[in-house]
Amino acid sequence: MADNRDIDHHSGVETTGHEWDGLKELNNPLPRWWVLVFWATIIWSVAYWVVYPSWPMLPGADRSADYVKGIWGVSERAQAMAGVAADKAAQSKFTDQIAKMSLKEINASPELLKFSAVAGRMAFLNNCAGCHGSGAQGGPGYANLNDDNWLWGGTLDEIQQTILYGIRNGADQARGGGSTAGMPERASVLKPDQINDVAEYVLSLSKKSADAAASARGKALFSGDGGCTACHGDDGKGNKDLGSANLTTGIFQWGGAKADIVKTIAEGRAGVMPAWAGKLEPTAVKELAVYIHSLGGGK
Ligand code: HEC
Ligand code: HEC
């Protein structure tokens, strides 16, 4: 058999027979390290198949059995669940106490207060921030929880009550007691210039009115035809049973510009908050109450 191998004259190495414009490709062996790595990866992959989950099987009723588990039986889900259980166990040191203690006792314990601040903050971000803002600063129509101005009361128990049952959501235990009514519209009772005057008076309650004459006319309407004192009190300081705002603080959930106040009076306002009893663990509600109370001057 004729030897038709082509040997390169300069290097003495056999060529592959490929040639481009007189350049020939030498058929050098692969470097040894490369071949070793190549075999190592093959051996690795075979070993991996054996010890780790690798092959899918036909899906059956039992989803946990529709793959080959490998001899080590590794499961990331099981690892995650074990992590959660370990976290729960570590936290139970605190949550077991929180479950048993009153809000006052929790608030008085520096350790539990610190834990509640972190756990309450997490629960807040997950459940409340959508309406109240990530900094609990609120927004038009959504209560600011950082100030010490409370529509429904700022004691630990009052805050817990608000969180448990919500506000004006129609449930009997909710703030508003089964009613969804809030501030009624007054456009059917007052004429636009009267609404303007009464808005001026509301501004004067926090020393923000620039029109003394209009404010004086508004004062008469506030206790007279406007019927405002029935809910906001003679002094305008509101009533926590009704959630009627204290109008003397200069803090306005629905906006403190003259135009906002005119709109509030003309059209009425009714903030609604869902209940959290049954949705959050009782300990989470307690942590939230203590956390919210700590934010901005709870009572
Ligand atoms: C769907 C929107 C919404 C969500 C979610 C929500 N809130 Fe509220 N919350 C409101 C509104 C609106 C008000 C103001 C109601 C009013 O005008 O009387 C309010 C008021 C409050 C008040 C009373 C403030 C006061 O001045 O008395 C507290 C306390 C409160 N929210 C806590 C929470 C906590 C804690 C969560 C999460 C577990 C939460 N809220 C989730 C809408 C919401
Ligand atoms: C039937 C009870 C009721 C009457 C009457 C009433 N209010 Fe209100 N008012 C409320 C309630 C409740 C709120 C809180 C609404 C909310 O936050 O959801 C409120 C809120 C307000 C606010 C908004 C406060 C804020 O934080 O932004 C203003 C301003 C106001 N009332 C002014 C008046 C004036 C002026 C009158 C009379 C013309 C009047 N109200 C009559 C119950 C009443």
Image (tube, rainbow, N blue to C red):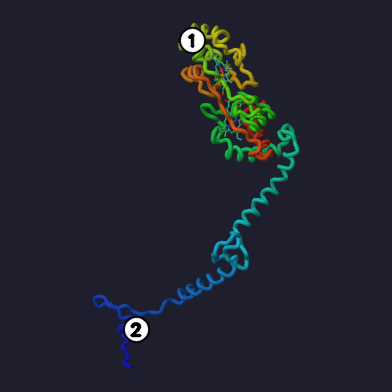
Residue 191's x, y, as percent?
47, 11
**In front: mark 1 or mark 2?**
1
Q: Nearer the viewer, residue 67 or 114?
A: 67
**Cα separation between marks 1 and 2:** 106 Å
Q: Residue furthest front?
A: 61
Label 1 neighbour load within 10 Å: few <14, some 14-19, many 20+: many
Q: Ligand 2: does it lie within 8 Å of the C-beta at label 1?
A: no
Q: Quadrant of ligand 1?
A: top right
Residue 211's x, y, as percent?
48, 9
Indicate left or right for 141 with 242 as reference: left
Q: Nearer the viewer, residue 230 or 22?
A: 230
For the point 61% across and 39% down, which residue is it? 123
Provide the secondary structure element on which disc 2 rests. Answer: loop
For the point 67% across and 40% down, which residue is it? 281
Indicate left or right for 171 with 57 as reference: right
Amino acid tagged 1: Gln
Q: Quadrant of residue 274?
A: top right
Q: Which mark is residue 112?
A: none
Relative to 16, is 263 above or below?
Answer: above
Q: Quadrant of the C terminus?
A: top right
Relative to 78, is 162 above or below?
Answer: above
Label 2 neighbour load within 10 Å: few <14, some 14-19, many 20+: some
Amino acid tagged 2: Glu
For the point 56% across and 26% down, which residue is it? 271
| Disc 2 target residue | 14
| Disc 1 target residue | 194
Q: Ligand 1: does it lie within 8 Å of the C-beta at label 2?
A: no
Residue 61's x, y, as percent?
59, 59
Provide the secondary structure element on which disc 1 rests. Answer: helix
Q: Is residue 150 visible in the rendered structure shown here? A: no
Residue 276's x, y, as percent?
63, 35
